[in-house]
Amino acid sequence: MSEPTTGVAVRQTIVVQASQERAFTVFTERFDSWWPREGKSVGAAPAVAVAIEPRAGGRWYERAADGTECSWGDVIAYEPSERIVLRWDLSAAFEPQRDAGPVVEVRFVAEGPQTTRVELEHRGLEHYGDAAGPAADAVAGDRGWPQILAAYAAAV
């Protein structure tokens, strides 16, 4: 029998040349303008739009060309210019799964008037049990958060 996995998290940090307010706004309110589509859709049909509703209790989701929507989770905390916390309602295989357990927290830390450090933590992956390690490897790999954050940085 294997030991339970605890505290599995992936952390990524980037620095963008933008004010803290702009960095936050582009990440949240302009999410659709920078989120990479290829290989990132989890719905039955490819996503043509993705969105974060800018408020605690809002949705984080994708929409297909036929109008169907697939939830990625909910907004747990929405603190303009400071941080956003998103519930990750996807399984270890990146399929919709309500209350899967993981959370994505993104913090925006001003390092100067036009420089912001963006700190992302994808935690709670231990909820996947034996799949926690492979799930962490996937979100930390080249096609995971590093690719996503690079697209975000280019948009800022």
Image (cartoon, grey):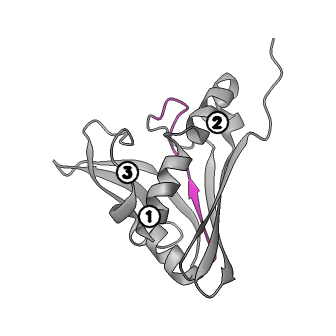
- Residue underneath mark 1: 154
Residue type at mark 3 is Pro
- Image location of residue 19, percent across then percent down: 56, 83
- Image location of residue 74, percent across then percent down: 50, 57
Q: Earlier in the sequence, mark 1 or mark 2?
A: 2
Q: Nearer the viewer, residue 57 or 138?
A: 138
Q: Earlier in the sequence, mark 1 or mark 3?
A: 3
- Residue underneath mark 2: 136
What is the residue that sits farthest to the left in this orientation? 66
Residue type at mark 1 is Ala
For the residue carrying disc 3, how many other residues have a C-alpha within 10 Å: few (<14), some (14-19), or many (20+)? some
Q: Which mark is residue 36?
A: 3
Query: Picture quarter containing residue 139?
Result: top right
What is the residue that sits farthest to the bottom in this orientation? 113
For the residue carrying disc 2, how many other residues have a C-alpha within 10 Å: few (<14), some (14-19), or many (20+)? many
Looking at the image, residue 3 sits to the left or right of residue 46; the answer is right
Rendered residue at 48%/40% (across/down)? 143
Look at the numbered disc 3 and give the secondary structure of its residue.
loop
Q: Which residues are magenta?
A: 81-94
Rendered residue at 24%/38% (across/down)? 45
Front position among marks 3 and 2: 3
Say which quadrant the N terminus sits in.
top right
Q: Earlier in the sequence, mark 3 or mark 2?
A: 3
Query: Picture quarter containing residue 106?
Result: bottom right
Residue type at mark 2 is Ala
| In the image, residue 48 above or below residue 107 | above
